[in-house]
Image (spheres, grey):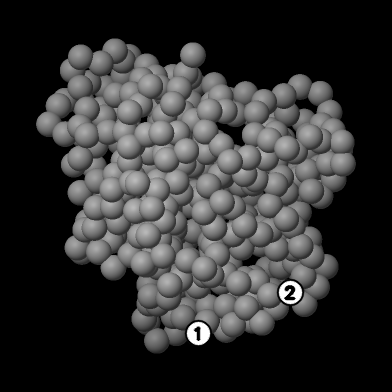
Amino acid sequence: MAVDLTCPECGSVYEAGPNEPWRCGCGHALEFTERPHPQGDPLPLHSLDTSEGLWTFFEFLPIEQHVTFYEGFTPMVDVPDWGAAFKLEYVFPTGSFKDRGATTTLSRAVELGVEKVIEDSSGNAGASIATYAARAGLEADIYVPADVKQSKLMTIQRADARPVRVDGARADVTAACLEAVEGNSSGDDETTTGERDAPYQTGEGWYASHAWNPAFYAGTMTFAFEVAAQQGWSVPDAIVLPIGHGTLFLGAYRGFSLLNEAGIVEEMPRLLGAQAAGHAPIVAALGGESTDEDGEGTTIADGIQISDPARDTEILDAIAETGGDAIAIGGDPIETALDRLHRNGFYVEPTCAVAPAALEQYREAGVIDEDDDVVVPLTGSGLKTL
């Protein structure tokens, strides 16, 4: 039976179902009522059967496996010239770490008996949700910016999903998507112990949102499990991650938190965020410089141009609780890091270069010491830049 949803802010509980609300009536993001984790000591990596990919960690997941390409356990490569280990998240089936969340989100959709999913995305998440919807045999509408990269648009179309191109800013794409999700119904017939004005999904389909849907974060938190397993069930000193909506950033935080609760590890890594200059609301909230030296922004990292992250408070809490930080990176450092990555054999998309560029700046500022154990995910393939 599918797990119900609850609001950590006001305590409301909502019954699981294809018409469940996509957020609480109080405006807060919803979470699962269950937070499972295994008992006992974990097996060393060489003894783990990883043939199920990230679903190897099913005991941590409040979702049953229904839709998968056996994705996960991406390689971790030591890169001495960078003083870090790169986790190659761009080798997933659709070329993006977003597949972590797509496999759990579409598995949840199947559990609920959903017939059609709807998502809004700058490209990568939409391509991933479309691909996994195809694997599940479900219809999918993917709302994207009008100028979405052609490679990502083609991935959506070839998976037989329906791309809906929206003019305007990224926020306009979300607004159009939510109008389709909610339709004209208030959801008064739903069973809930929470607010009656919760936005139920009674429109054209189920909101498979990488920003709001807790099923997506159940998938991205497996990043932390893999890092710990690949390091002998230990925790790195720091992880440098990109932040748009913060799906991988919060996934890492949730995953390492669960490992601590389970008694598998005893520390948390410092979570160090990287945002694109001019699109850095988390940096601004921390009191940092959110534009480049000329007071300008950059358009090169289109995958994280999010002005209003759905879970901004959670991101700030994760930074505070791990002794982390967030900085904004301008176009020149991103392009320099991207060129260096390509020349070292890591063919990634521009957004992916934001975290490696931030790694250098954190090191120059003394936030990361030379002998610190640092992990940096490389999040998207360069094949998606066409």
Q: Pointer 2: what residue?
A: 82
In this view, the residue in front, 266 or 92, is 92
User: Which of the numbered marks, if any, corresponds to residue 332?
Assistant: 1
Q: Is residue 291 visible?
A: no
Q: Is residue 356 left or right of residue 250?
A: right
Q: Locate residue 267, reporting x and y percent.
A: 75, 44
In this view, the residue in front, 237 or 64, is 64
In the rendered view, would you say 348 is above or below 249?
A: below
- Tag 2: amino acid: Trp
- Tag 1: amino acid: Asp
Q: Determine crowd level at label 2: few under 14, some 14-19, many 20+ residues with C-alpha closer than 10 A.
A: some
Q: Is residue 344 left or right of residue 277?
A: right
Q: Is residue 113 visible?
A: yes
Quadrant in the picture for residue 81: bottom right
Q: Locate residue 330, reporting x and y percent.
A: 47, 79
Q: Residue at x 33, y 46 (%)?
A: 161
Q: Residue furthest left?
A: 184
Mark closest to the chain's N terminus, 2 or 1: 2
Q: Residue at x 48, y 19 (%)?
A: 3
Q: How many marks?
A: 2
